[in-house]
Amino acid sequence: MSASPVPPEKMSQVARSVLTKNLQLKKGERLTVEGFSHTLDWATAFAREARHLGALPVILFEDEDAYWDALDRKEEAVLGAAAAHEWALLGKTDAYLHMWGVGDKVRLAKLPAKRRQRAFAFNDAWYAAAKKAGLRGFRLELGRPYPNLAEAYGVDERTWMDQVLAATLVDPDSLQRAAAPIARALERGRKLRIRDDAGTDLTLGLRGRKATVNAGRVPPPPRPSVFASMGGLPAGSIRVALDEAVADGTFVANRTDYFETATATGGSFEFRKGRLVDHHFASGGEAFEEGFRAGGKGRDQPGQFSIGLNPALHDTPQVEDVEKGAVMVTVGGNIFNGGANKSPFFGFAINVGARVEVDGRPLPGLG
């Protein structure tokens, strides 16, 4: 259970905002809210506010202790089984909210990979059922702050939660307005240059690919992928797949990389002729190195470029790329965002405040 409970009035404010501004929940629509023990109060707040709107909520609840009892008994195959009655519920659901499941993600990360895969084997079937139902939903970061995860990240749990709540309340219309000219520039441009006064000077290529905008709304069907039914909140980012053959120069990070339960700081990437030729981190680079070693073909190619738009975030775990002015450069796979690189590796570094130009012109709206 969180050591820093959120006051009920704040829960009501956030729930009302998510339901009306992000989900745009309407009278008579059917809402499903999924929560664990540490997010049950949140699930209740969403259900209450949904009823105020005339919508029909259902809560799917999992007890933290019962979940760990199943894993302690090695019952992950049962946890991961496709549940036909749950898919039937999805088939009648219009809108869905998920709060990132189990609270103790530090303990979860310590399980062998094969056991975790079995416990989450239902995932593809869940998304297939969601797509068939045409539902729209969000995964809410407000379910992620947890005492031992805050300790693992080296952050204050209360500050983390406060930033997530404030960022979740940012109006999606304002994010969409800010994103539109940036997305157009990235889709029409050919050369991207990133610079700062601390050693960053990197040139990347653009190929006219569609930019993915996360402004806090789920697009109506038909959606570009099976995973597009579920957006993320807090919102506020634009991503585009880069030209996999173009990258020259240096990118120096000034923000923390937050991995599953660990961090890396002081990252630096060196590219030559479309390849990552050198990289290092001041601390915590082991997670990057482990993935890089297993990344296979394409692991050293430029992957994606992203820019953040949300003014309420500052070096916030798991949404570090959504902070306003956060420039993210990735290496490895980008096929899931319209690129051609199929590498399973996804490595990244983030710089807040760098100057960005597209074809020699400053990227609009970042001043």
Image (cartoon, rainbow, N blue to C red):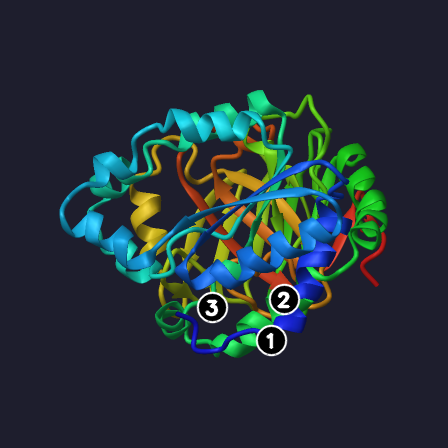
Q: For numbered disc 2, what is the local secondary structure?
A: helix
Residue 320 x, y percent position in the rendering: 57, 61
Residue 60 x, y percent position in the rendering: 46, 45
Where residue 80 sits, quadrant-wise, is top left
Q: Is residue 3 left or right of residue 320?
A: left
CB atoms of marks 2 and 1 within 8 Å: yes
Amino acid type at image mark 3: Gly
Residue drawn 83% across the image and 52% down it: 178
Q: How crowded is mark 1: few (under 14 residues within 10 Å), some or many (20 or more)?
A: few
Amino acid type at image mark 1: Pro
Q: In this view, does 62 lie to the left or right of 52?
A: left
> Which residue is under mark 3?
266
The disc label shown at residue 11, or none? 2
Looking at the image, can residue 242 be seen?
Answer: no
The tag earlier along the polypeptide, 3 or 2, is 2
3D distance between C-alphas at marks 2 and 1:
6 Å
Residue 233 x, y percent position in the rendering: 62, 53
- Is residue 360 positioned above or below 42 on the image? above
Return the residue found at the far left: 73
The tag earlier along the polypeptide, 1 or 3, is 1
> Which residue is under mark 1?
7
Badge nearest the viewer, 1 or 3: 1
Residue drawn 47% across the image and 35% down it: 333
3D distance between C-alphas at marks 3 and 2:
36 Å
Q: For numbered disc 1, what is the local secondary structure?
A: loop
